[in-house]
Image (tube, rainbow, N blue to C red):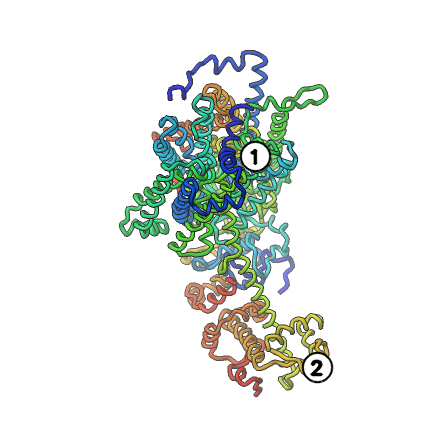
Amino acid sequence: MSDFFPIFDFIDIFWTPWSTPQDYIWNGKIVLMGFFVSASCGMIGSFIVVRRLALMGDAISHGILPGLVLAFIVSQSKALLPMFIGACAAGMLCNFCIEWLNKKTPIKLDSAMGLTFTSFFALGIILIAQFANNAHIDAECLLYGEIGYIPLEKHIFIGDFHLGPRPLVFMGVVLISITVLIILFYKQLMVTSFDLTLSVTLGLPVKIFHYGLMLCLAFTIVSSFESVGVILVIAMIIFPSITASFFVTRMPNILFSTIPLSAFYSIGGFCFARWFDCSIASAMVVVAMLCFFVAWLVGKENGILLNFTKPKTFSKIK
Amino acid sequence: MNATKTFSLTLIFLPISQLLASTKDLDFFDRTLRFFSFNDYSVQVVVLGVIFMGIGCGLMGGLVVTRRLSLFSDTLSHAVLPGIVIGFILGGFKSSFVVIIGAMVAGFLGVTLISSITKYTKIRLDSALGLVLSGFYAMGVCFLTRIQKLEFGNQSGIDRYIFGQIAGISSTDLYTIVISGVLILAIIILFYKELLVTGFDSNFAHSIGLPVEFIQYIFWMLLAFTVITSLQIVGVILVSALLIIPAATASIITQNMKTLLLWSSLFAVVSGIIGAYLSFLGNSLPTGPIIVLCSCCIFIIILFLHWKNGLLLKWYRLRGKEKKIAVENTLKAVYQELEVQRFSKDLILISDLAKRRRVSVPEVCQEIIPLIEQELAFVKESSNPKLRGENKIALSPKGWSEACRIIRNHRLWELYLTNEVQYQADHVHDDAEKIEHILGDELVRKLEKILSNPTKDPHGKLIPSQQDIKRGYMHIQ
Amino acid sequence: MKHKSPLPLEIHDLTISYEDKPVLYGIDLKISDGVLVGIIGPNGAGKSTLIQAIMGMVKPLGGWVKIFGQKEKKAYLRVGYIPQKESVDWSFPVSVLDVVLMGRYGHAGWLRRISKKDRSIAYECLEKVNMHSFADRQIGKLSGGQQQRVFLARALAQESDLYLMDEPFAGVDAVTENATIELLRELKNKGKTLIVVHHDLSNAKEYFDEIILLNMRLIAHGPVKEVYTKELLQKTYGGRLTVFTEIADQSTKR
């Protein structure tokens, strides 16, 4: 038990990883990747959470596993396009099954969700087991991801300019595209999330936005699974916006807050993993959970401390 | 290969490799025989474990699904992971009792956290479930990868808690599973009424003086206990599937709680045994996922093929209804054609009928065939077996009364809509087109009474009376 | 009856069933310009469903709805809608001004940002309902009446010609109710058409020009004087058409 908690060596944790240029570049890539993943998931997640689709996100992230494995087996590589196609197909099928079961059978929504995604997930695991020997499937990578090996991936060059490892560059592109999409369609996303009837009145294609958002979610999950895996990605989707909502109440502010929060998750997770010697992705989520507890304690909206001392000015009218 | 990767591979393939190693020299039939002859000690342990786990999961699943707590149970099963790891460390990697205690504590913390988040903040239930699920699971993975790095970590046997490893259960594990299965069965039988009423309407339960909170508490403890004892067989991620899927399957078959619980545990047991068998065959199939897929297959089979509520049968019945409606519509057209001729003849030209149905002659012939088959109508003056436009058909007595009944339904309903519901006369026809096929005798009696036995519909046409139907022809005054 | 300009709202033989339960049956309705119409009926009479059907939110089994003579979705741009309180997510991260600005989205293009002009219009609308001092507050932190006024401001900002309101007076203080009805009359005098779902029989007579009595089917529609009679109200609330509902039930269960 005693060696379960290692000694807290301040210099080793906070200084050594950044002491030489070599270490600096190596670890910088890991931290940057963590930031990219968390920020992209967090931004999409802000809309997922307000649309009450958090569990749908969970279901889809479990449900894409067979798609990923099949794509892996067929293409024999971690190439992005087949992975993406496989995952989206599986995710959409999962989504379709849930909606179909909910509408056409007496099965309730929660059971439909639990039923569908566990079955998909089980199928994925069996596929891994069946084809592992001849496809060199990296099960660890699919389930938990391994952000620590990101710098080992093939590097991308544009001309002579060295961009960085493939997943890192790709995740950067994902983050930028998500940001651009959100800025472009901010109004529409807000209205369709807040008031369905008004969006119909305004002639917005509600369904297209719903499925577009789901597609973006699937895309983000697929691009993140290499670093955090299919199970923990849901944490990256929910935690940032929920934590931010303890301090700010407007959507733009929540979206902005995901950026410092993600940076903190990434750096904090890295340091925690450095100290505890565990997987970095799970350490990031643990840090995110700690942040959530702190925010719950001190947040100005519904925080425990402030609400304890300050009487409520407005009673909730229901 | 580095340590973590090797770990994860072992994690999934350990059960398989073990099975493969032990049964390499046997072929398929031998293994099947060995499994079902039930002589092997290991087979006995496995089958008994699966049976009692199935009973426990099936019963609790029935309660969980009817209370709409499916996703709650999923969160609970993920949330016990850190407890398991801590339990392992505290118990010195030997005692499964400490592991169970650890898992209980973690599960309890998780459930408390969910309820306090939804109670004290504005965060909605779905987000709260996601938060606790992923946060606790991450904590578990964090600890797990930590002890992997320690020297003693690799022989710990924690791996089997993630995807389950049926071959690895010891006789002590079996005792725990059997005890929990029996315990759950006993408690559900004893507190059946209380569990039912608190699940259905907790306010009412409170008002009749039941200790609602205490019963809920027992429910949660039982659920946590089920989840934890099943972990060794199906694993953390998939244990909720074994709760949800059999119960969902049962909910297709029946609405009755007792039968639902019965079916649900039966399905869980069956899928468990099939899964254990397939896993035993050594086709490199990990136990947990294969059991889940088995229960999923059972679900799909029941969903489509169940004799009463199956979707295929429903679809078939709908087809039958559509056929019946088509027959009735043709009969109606024949009647209307007769009516145009003021019932002076009882024969009509098929080409006239086609015109009335607004279809071509060959099409109308297709429509007439089932009428002839059911002896509702017959063709006259034709030596040619093939139907043609210039042939004439007549209604049999049975066909006549059927046609009258449909027309009567149609016109009665039209009259009801105009007189009693104040529909405008031009709206009533389309509605009556649908209603005429489903009006039962009882409702027709009611309509007759309300409309005081009318003779004419809103368009001024005669409503065939009961006497006309019996008489076999229309009596025109 | 021929009109010069198309009617704001025309409904023909509209039938709607919701989860196998028929809700509305063969509704015919014509509503002309510049009137304040109240929809009245008992619980479960399908009042909200009617509003939703007009907005195209529920798919009818039969019949059609025309808004300003159009069946296309384009016509919805001329409709302002105030939702029922229960259907709003009050913890949504938007401020009062954000909500009112949403009413202007129809006037801004697809990818264009909200202009200064839109902002000032939104602000004016907030002033009209006397809510400008709350512009930055999150919508959940308002009292029931204030919340109602925010949505009223949003409908104003939409600058629509036809307004549909689902129970705007439910759970609202007397001040807000009076202010709202004043505002509705003002809109009416500008030639707008307003359709309001209302649950309170006692003041319906004073509030509206026309009344629609609804109980699964249209019982009566006309000026208050003609429709607000004891006999018709009894028919609306009494409902003895058991055979009707029984059969309607059966017909959708198939």
- Tag 1 subunit: A
Q: Is residue B3 above or below residue B376?
A: above
Q: Quadrant of the N terminus of chain B?
A: top right
Residue occupied by mark 1: A221
CA gap, disc 1 to disc 2? Answer: 72 Å
C42 lies left or right of A216? left
Is there any visible trace of residue C95 in the rendered image? no
Residue A183, x across and y down, in percent: 60, 33
C212 lies left or right of A166? left
Q: Nearer the viewer, residue B471 or B141?
A: B141
Q: Quadrant of the C terminus of chain B?
A: bottom right
Is there any visible trace of residue B242 in the rendered image? yes
Q: Residue at x 47, y 79 (%)?
A: B452
Residue occupied by mark 2: B382
Q: Nearer the viewer, residue B473 or C25?
A: B473
Mark 1 residue element:
helix
